[in-house]
Amino acid sequence: MVLYRIMLEDSSAAVTAHDGAAETAFVELARLKKDRGALILAHTYQLPEIQAAADLVGDSLELSRAAARTDARVIVFCGVRFMAETAKILAPDRTVLLPAEDAGCPMADSITAENLRDFKSRYPGRPVVTYINSTAEVKAESDWCCTSANALRVIEAVDSPEILCVPDRNLARWCQRNTTKKLVWWDGFCLVHVRIDPEDARAAKAKYPDALLLAHPECEPEVLDLADHVLSTSQMLAFAARSPARRFLIATEAEVVGKLRRDHPDREFYTVGPAQHCVNMKKTRLADVLRALETGKPAVTLDLDLMARARRPIDRMLALG
Ligand code: SF4
């Protein structure tokens, strides 16, 4: 018998779990969590079974804040590597486990510390605002961090009329449209969001003219041009919760559509074109979380000096509130 089955429109992704196996796994998970004094954090792009197992589901900023303030001895980070690294930087005395060790982020990996040092040398004196979707080494070379939820606020807070933005070109372009400061950006991008096609956005709007199109700033500018609102993942969830609208077109990773449908079964949420999934975010399975809690591995380890340097730009961002 199926415990839950979630299929996203236009998607081949289906997640199923059977009562007996799932129940056993969740009982074991609760036992291990208590034994280890663990907190389970899951990004909104994680599979529904992982979201169901988590103490907190959120975006990068929400999860970073939770990591910074937790008393838990162990943080199990269900996401990709840069997120678990950020948790470790903010909670260096805790054990941070990344259940799917090979879950990386091509956008974060599009720039190395050496690339950034070279970029800075071409624009001397310009401060660097680095998207949280970046490696610890790149954060350590940066002046500020930002997320998609607060990028514009960070840019306005930086005391400089010219700023370097890495690694996401689309987030930087979006900010450039909304600030008088001059931004120079790295040419990185998210493979998942750039696959969302403006033609599909036009077709979806024509099919559902009463729907609001909410788009993530990692989408291409042509998609953002068609959006009613450009919002981070957490902002989309909050917007939908308070909006009187009945129909929404959601231009971001498809798991967000699944979550919105579960949270608001009385309303309609559609992907823009084919559902886009981040393969790295889908690498974490319940069995991986159980194994990580059982074995205490794989744990994120970072050099102490690197963590101290990477923490400064994150703390500046968090201090903005
Ligand atoms: S959705 Fe994009 S930015 Fe986020 S982890 Fe996947 S590849 Fe990286």
Image: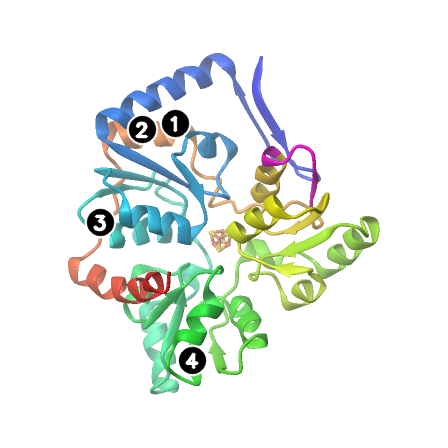
Residue 300 spot, x, y in % from top left: 26, 46
Label whose residue precedes the other's in the sequence (3 or 2): 2
Disc 1 residue: CB within 8 Å of ligand 1: no
- Alpha carbon of mark 4 to alpha carbon of mark 2: how far? 43 Å
Image side of residue 193 versus residue 39, left or right: right
Q: In which quarter of the image is residue 31?
A: top left
x 48%, y 29%: residue: 49
| Residue 81 visible in rendering | no
Q: In which quarter of the image is residue 138?
A: bottom left
Residue for badge 1: 287
Q: Residue 163 carries which label?
A: 4
Mark 4 is surrounded, within 10 Å at the Cα level, by few (under 14), some (14 to 19) or many (20 or more) other residues, namely many
Residue for badge 3: 301
Mark 1 is surrounded, within 10 Å at the Cα level, by few (under 14), some (14 to 19) or many (20 or more) other residues, namely few
Residue for badge 2: 291
Label whose residue precedes the other's in the sequence (4 or 3): 4
Residue 230 spot, x, y in % from top left: 61, 61
- Alpha carbon of mark 4 to alpha carbon of mark 3: how far? 31 Å
Determine whether label 3 and label 1 are within 8 Å by CB: no
- Asked if 4 appears above or below 242 in the picture, the reply is above
Disc 3 residue: CB within 8 Å of ligand 1: no
